[in-house]
Structure formats: structure tokens, C-alpha cells
Amino acid sequence: MKALVDNQRGTSAVEMAIVSPLLVMFIFGIIEFGLLFYNKAMITNASREAARAGIVYGDPYLNVPQIRDVAIKYLTRDDGKSMLVSFGSGSGPDPQVPSGECADHGQELVVNVIYHYEFLLLPDFLTAFFTEGEPSGLPGSIDISTETKMRCE
């Protein structure tokens, strides 16, 4: 009986089997949320660039489609592909200018950019790991949005 108690072979494999799913989930979570925050920063910058282009005095000011084009151009590489990272069939960015174009000095211009972000693996992995086929209520995608307000020059 003493030989069975002193035999420690295989304990490392059992410990690794217990810890590895949590470690993998943690690593994928870091990657997933890193991509999410990258996309949030990109649409925030695009919104800011579009608002700045829309408020700068020109004769005439930029109109709504031109302001939207500035935001889309900011999010597009030279080869025409999106700079946003998404692994699903997510829709592209949707810049909106609810306040319209600048018509007068001091008017406030609002630019919103909305992006439908689809998660890479995390919700599917958590659903499979914790619920054994039952829905967990975790969303497979979210809408990231940002709003920039600037006064017309």
C-alpha cells in the first residue's frame, strides 16, 4: 500500500489537464479583447478625422457624403482592404453625420461611427466549455460605436 501512496508519476499530466483549458481561455481572451480595443481605437480616430475635416472652414464646407468618405478612407488601406480586424462576416463601418454639415460658424458637427464586431473564438469556446451544448447567452458579436462633436470654424 505504501508504494501506491509514494508513486507521484502522472500528477503533472493531471495538473496540466486541469489548468490548460483555463490557460487557453485566458490567452484567447487577451487576443480577442486586444483586437476589440484596436478596432475601437481605429473607429474613434476615423470619427475624429471625419469631424475635423467637416468643421475646417472651406468654401463650401464638406457635405455629409464627403465627411462619411473621410471616415471610410481613414479605415481603408491603399489596396482597398479594411484596416479593421474581424474574422466573421461582419458589416463594414457605418459613419453617420446626424447633425448634418456645417452651415454656420460655431455650429456643432456630430460624427458617429458604428462597427459590427464579430468575436473570433471566445463566445463559442466558452459555450462549448461550460454548457455542453446549451446556449450560454454570450453574444457572438457586438456593435462598437463612437461619437465625436466639434464646433465649426
Image: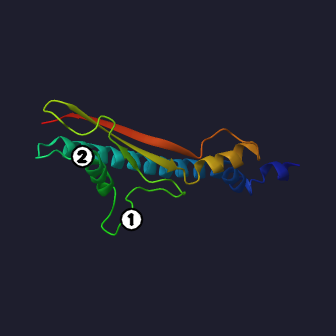
Location of mark 2 (residue): 63
Q: Amino acid at mark 2?
A: Asn
Q: Is residue 17 left or right of residue 84?
A: right
- Where is residue 10 shown, x and y percent of the image? 74, 57
Using the image as rendered, state which of residue 116 and residue 99 is in the foreground: 99
- Where is residue 99 shown, x and y percent of the image? 30, 34
At label 1, counting other C-alpha atoms closer than 10 Å, the crowd grade (few under 14, some 14-19, many 20 or more) is few
Q: Secondary structure at mark 2?
A: loop
Q: Is residue 7 left or right of residue 23?
A: right
- Where is residue 57 shown, x and y percent of the image? 11, 42
**The C terminus, quarter of image:** top left
- Give the CA separation, mark 2 to mark 1: 25 Å
Using the image as rendered, state which of residue 103 and residue 136 is in the foreground: 103
Rendered residue at 74%/53% (across/down):
8
Rendered residue at 21%/44% (across/down):
54
Rendered residue at 26%/51% (across/down):
66
Q: Amino acid at mark 1?
A: Lys
Location of mark 1 (residue): 81
Vertical placement of 69 versus 61: above or below?
A: below
Q: Earlier in the sequence, mark 2 or mark 1?
A: 2
Rendered residue at 41%/50% (across/down):
93
Vertical placement of 106 versus 121: above or below?
A: above
Tell me whether the residue at label 2 lies in contact with that at label 1, contact meaning CB atoms closer than 8 angstroms: no
Q: Quadrant of residue 48?
A: top left
At label 2, counting other C-alpha atoms closer than 10 Å, the crowd grade (few under 14, some 14-19, many 20 or more) is some
